[in-house]
Amino acid sequence: MKKKRWYILGGGLLLAAAVLIGAALWIQTHPAETAETRVQAAVAEHVAERAAPPASSAPGPEDTPAPEATEPPYESPVDFPSLWEMNSEIYAWLYIPGTEVNYPILQREGNDKFYLNHNSQGRYSDGGAVFTESAYNSKDFTDPVTLVYGHYMRSGTMFGSLQATYTAENGMAEHQEIIVYLPEQELHYQVFAAVPFNMRHILYYNDFRNRKVFEAFLEQVMSVRSINASIDGEAEVTAEDQLLILSTCLRGDSKQRYLVLAKRMADISAP
C-alpha cells in the first residue's frame, strides 16, 4: 500500500509540475502573440474601412451651407508601444491588402543575419522574421532602395505567398498596393514588377545613389522574361523614385530570388 501511495503521490507531483510549466510558458508567450495578432487585425480593419464607401446622409435645406470637411489627425492602426514591449527592434509594419503579408519589420544593429532564424519575439525559429539590414538601410525608408527580406515558407507565412499572389491572373492588379506603417507615418507603394532575379546582393553590388546604376538596374528588372515574371508595362519608374523591394526565395529554383518591386507613391503623416 505504501508503494502504491508513493506512485500516486509521485504521479500527482509530476502532473502538477507539468501544469505549472505549461502555465508559465503560456503566460510568457501569450502577451507577445496577442500584441502581434491584434495589430494584424487592426491593420486589416483600417484598410477595409478606408476602402468602404462613405455612408450617405440625408440632404439638408438648400439654404444651409454644408460644413467644411476636416481630416481627423492621423492615428496609426499599429500599436507600436505594445509591440516594443515584445521586441524593441520592431520599427515598422508591412501590409499587402488582401494577402497574408501582414507582419512587423525588424532590424538588429550590427547583426543582419539574426532574423534569418529568429522570429519577431527574438526567439529561435526556422521561419525567421521580416527584416532589413542595418548595414545598408536606415529605418525611415528614405534610402533610394529599401530591401526587405522574408523566408519563402511552404505554409504561406512570411513571404511564402508572394510568388503565388503575383503570378496569378490579375494578381498584380488586385494587389498593387503595399503599405508600410511607421509610428508617425504610413507609406504607400505601388507594385510595378514581380520577377525572378539572380542571387547577387542587390544593395552590395548597386550604388543606387548613382543615377546610371539605378537606371541600369531598372532596365534589367523590366527586361526579365519568365513564366514567373509579372511586369506593369505602363508603370513609369525612374531613378528619382524611392523603391521598396521584397525579397524571398524563388519556388522551384534555389539559385534565384523572387522580388516584388514597388515605388513610393504617397505618405500620410501625423501633424
Image (cartoon, helix red, strand yellow):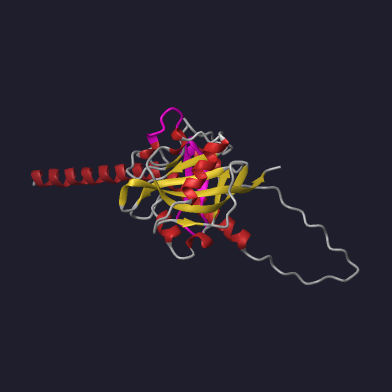
Q: Nearer the viewer, residue 152 or 42?
A: 152
Q: Is residue 212 left or right of residue 66?
A: left
Closest to the observer, 160 or 256: 256
- Residue at coordinates 29% horizontally, 46% vertically from top-left? 19
Q: Is residue 21 left or right of residue 167?
A: left
- Image position, residue 41 (x, y; %): 51, 55
Q: Position of residue 216 (x, y in %)?
A: 51, 42
Furthest residue toward top: 110
Residue 62 quadrant: bottom right
Q: Quadrant of the C terminus?
A: top right
Q: Residue shown at 72%/51% (left/top)?
A: 72
For image coordinates 21% across by 46% down, the residue present is 12
Residue 87 belongs to the span the image colors magenta: yes
Instruction: Please indicate, yes or no, whether residue 82 appears anywhere in the rendered image.
Output: no
Figure disc tally:
0
Decide: is 259 above or below 232: above
Magenta span of residues = 85-114
| Residue 169 seen in this snapshot | yes
Residue extending furthest toward the right: 63
Percent position (x, y) of residue 111? 41, 30
Quadrant for residue 234, please give it: bottom right
List x then y, in percent, for residue 256.
35, 46
Would residue 69 be found to the left or right of residue 208 on screen? right
Inspect the magenta stretch and tell me whether residue 186 lies in it. no
